[in-house]
Image (tube, rainbow, N blue to C red):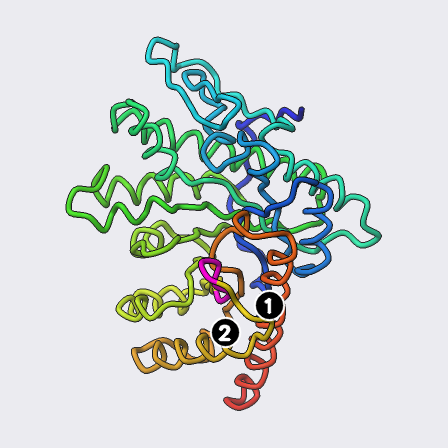
């Protein structure tokens, strides 16, 4: 068990821009061996390895239980379900200890990375964002105003804990910290859990609590506007034509220096062993976004590549294939970004 206070935080540091064409991953892997999962991401996506989440190893490592367990009013059962006791003192301190039952992937990643002859230059870690945690608390019976306030503080505290862990254990490694927000899809409805301004405040408040670079993963069919308004450094989007209507917002984000992590490897259907059709789909989307006002050079030079979502629903071999395809696509992104810069004389 590792315990780190949530009180320590540095000011936000801009740092240098990311290189073009980094490959990373979104969250979960199917492994039952934490060290094997860590070794896989360090080997296959070495430029930006993603800390694995391992919900099949222990259900308490799922995207809700592993973070909500810090709340005094929440009990996490062995099957990963949560129970909220309304009579517990909610003013009690949050418990940000890192347990092997809920953070085996993170702890194993640190151990394996420390054993590498060459430590990773940068790492991507992930936690569940305040909107998704707030929705879970509301569904468990907590009033919305209390739920989203607690969730924002909780997400911010965990973010500081992870940042401090990497600062202590891998001080020369740059951390990119993603907030996963699958519940953003609920803000497309006419009756969202809280209004859009409060949702934006909650998400931006969580991001502002850390000094490292941050990202937001917009999962599935969610509207990216709240994520864009929250001010991340990186926005995670799947490759989909439904984002064409958001071209003006994406253009502003890119012009301000933001990066887009394109979920170019589908995770909801089988994919072949060739990256060629995935590359064509990505380039076609870029071309259409360019026609709608996005800067073509920025689309390429400020791009990362990921699988569309987590890979826990895949087999180990299929998960490795998805990461390998992401890396191959990222190499193509890098090559095209360089070629585009040469063409325009950059």
The reply to whether dot 1 and dot 2 touch (C-beta < 8 Å) is: yes
Q: Quadrant of residue 333?
A: bottom right
For the magenta stretch, what is the residue range?
264-269
Q: Quadrant of the C terminus?
A: bottom right
Residue 14, given in percent of the width and then of the height, sits at: 53, 54
Residue 142, given in percent of the width and then of the height, sits at: 29, 23
What residue occupies the far right of the structure in this picture? 117
Q: Which residue is mark 1?
A: 325
Q: Residue at x 58, y 58 (%)?
A: 24
Residue 278 bears which disc, if any? 2
Q: Does the magenta-highlighted stretch encompass residue 75?
A: no
Mark closest to the chain's N terminus, 1 or 2: 2
Q: Which residue is more in the foreground, 300 or 17?
A: 300
SS majority, magenta? loop
Q: Secondary structure at mark 1?
A: helix
Tell me: residue 203, above or below residue 218. above
- Taking 202 as reference, is 283 left or right? right
Q: Residue at x 53, y 21 (%)?
A: 95
Q: Residue at x 49, y 28 (%)?
A: 80
């Amino acid at each position: 068990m590792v315990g780190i206070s949530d009180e320590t935080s540095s000011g936000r540091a801009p740092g240098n821009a990311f290189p073009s064409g980094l490959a990373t991953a979104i969250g979960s892997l199917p492994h039952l061996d934490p060290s094997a999962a860590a070794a896989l991401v360090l080997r296959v996506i070495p430029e930006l390895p993603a800390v694995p989440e391992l919900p099949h190893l222990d259900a308490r490592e799922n995207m809700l239980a592993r973070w909500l367990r810090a709340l005094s009013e929440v009990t996490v059962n062995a099957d990963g379900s949560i129970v909220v006791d309304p009579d517990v003192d909610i003013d009690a301190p949050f418990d940000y200890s890192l347990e092997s039952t809920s953070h085996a992937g993170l702890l194993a990643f640190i151990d394996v990375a420390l054993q590498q002859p060459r430590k990773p230059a940068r790492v991507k870690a992930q936690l569940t964002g305040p909107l998704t945690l707030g929705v879970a608390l509301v569904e468990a019976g907590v009033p919305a105003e209390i739920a989203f306030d607690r969730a924002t503080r909780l997400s911010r505290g965990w973010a500081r804990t992870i940042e401090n862990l990497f600062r202590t254990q891998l001080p020369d490694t740059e951390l990119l910290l993603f907030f996963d927000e699958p519940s953003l899809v609920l803000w497309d409805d006419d009756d969202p859990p809280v209004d859009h301004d409060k949702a934006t405040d909650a998400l931006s408040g969580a991001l502002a609590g850390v000094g490292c670079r941050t990202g937001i993963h917009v999962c599935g069919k969610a509207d990216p506007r709240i994520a864009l308004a929250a001010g991340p450094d990186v926005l995670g989007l799947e490759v989909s034509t439904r984002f064409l209507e958001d071209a003006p917002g994406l253009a502003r984000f890119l012009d301000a220096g933001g990066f887009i992590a394109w979920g170019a490897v589908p995770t909801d259907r089988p994919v072949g062993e060739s990256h060629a059709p995935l590359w064509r789909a990505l380039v076609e989307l870029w071309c259409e976004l360019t026609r709608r006002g996005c800067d073509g050079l920025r689309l390429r030079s400020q791009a990362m590549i990921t699988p569309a979502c987590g890979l826990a629903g895949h087999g180990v071999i299929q998960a490795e294939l998805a990461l390998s395809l992401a890396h191959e696509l990222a190499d193509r992104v890098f090559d095209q970004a360089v070629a585009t810069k040469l063409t325009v004389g950059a």
